Image (tube, rainbow, N blue to C red):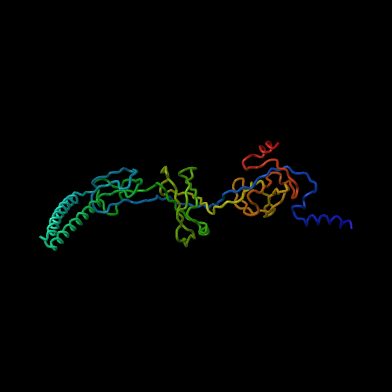
Amino acid sequence: MALRLILLPLLMLIALGPNHALAQPGSKPVPVIAYEVSQKAFTDRVEALGTLRANESVVLTASVTETVSAIHFDDGERVEAGQLLVEMTSQEEHALLEEAKVRVADAERQYERVRLLTRQQTASESLYDERKRDLETARASLAALESRLADRLVRAPFDGVLGLRKISPGALVEPGDEITTLDDDSVMKLDFSVPSVFLPDLKPGLRITATARAYGNRSFEGEVSGIDSRVNPVTRSIQVRAILPNADRVLKPGVLMRVELLRNPRTSPVVPEDALQQLGEDHFVVVIGADEKAERRPVTIGTRVPGFVEITEGLASGDRIITHGNDKARPGQPVTIKALDDGSGKLRDMLESSE
């Protein structure tokens, strides 16, 4: 009988649940430091290696076989689109061009003369058509010679920086011979491979951070601009391209960079690490209820950042949890908030300010 009287109150407390089983009637409030749950942006990081490429890049070559008569650039010079870089021997083409201009002028005079006579009905329509054909032929020959002359001039196709000069005045160049390189380095492309398991999270606009030994501790921010249409069947990875701004022109094509891809961006509740309790594989926090009593609540954690933990389930923004004193506050016990932890102050400072 005596044993039954002892067990009955314990069974009743257990039946009330964990928030009441440890609470003592009339217990004094426990002084605690509380934290109001807030939202924080999170991303998952994927590391990769990538190679820098210029926004536009071309190897300048000759389109005809001819000798170089003049060079108008220096090594590493910045040029604008259309700027003349190399001239090739073209005396014959210039002479033929002048001859073609004379023929066009003569054909225009003959055409105008016959056109007026045709209106006065003193010249036949066939003669008019013949002079018109002669004019069009002369103009076509002039356009062909202008094109041949343009082939002997090498111009910059876009704004950029030139590489090293590979030819000298007087050299005979042929189609395909390298003259120099031209790179548009206003922005840089960074190509890297990502395992295909992350394919559902890949999309243009994702942020990346890139670093390289050549640039010390400096990091470069960019975003994904494109994703390849095929997965490599050997490596099971996919090529991703990001764009990095390069206003100071420090980034160079060909540099190997370490890439951190920030995928799956989201906003979740966050709590300080000190507020988290662990029992086996389960995690808990002590929540301050509306009645100013402690409540032990299971939570599901996500990503950890220095000093804080992401909570994916169990808490909402605005909930108050105990960061210091949670080991003394039993479930169901009243608490007194001595200070609010904003995540930036030291415990000693908050305790002193609360006194």
Q: Horizontally, is 320 left or right of 45 in the view?
A: right
Q: Give the x, y percent position of residue 175.
A: 27, 54
Q: Residue at (49%, 48%) from the top-left corner?
A: 209
Q: Give the x, y percent position of residue 76.
A: 35, 43
Q: Residue at (83%, 55%) from the top-left corner?
A: 9
As drawn, which residue projects farthest toward the front? 120
Q: Give the x, y percent position of residue 164.
A: 33, 45
Quadrant for residue 31, please give it. Answer: top right
Q: Give the x, y percent position of residue 108.
A: 16, 54
- Judging depth in this view, the residue of 316 and 47 nearest the camera is 316
As drawn, which residue projects farthest toward the left? 122
The quadrant of the rendering that contains the N terminus is: bottom right
Up-down relation of residue 199 to residue 277 (above or below): below
The quadrant of the rendering that contains the C terminus is: top right
User: How many numbered marks appear?
Assistant: 0
Up-down relation of residue 244 to residue 123 (above or below): above
Q: Residue at (46%, 55%) from the top-left corner?
A: 240
Q: Residue at (48%, 43%) from the top-left corner?
A: 218
- Judging depth in this view, the residue of 256 and 160 nearest the camera is 160
As drawn, which residue projects farthest toward the right? 1
Q: Horizontally, is 200 left or right of 35 in the view?
A: left
Up-down relation of residue 19 to residue 354 (above or below): below
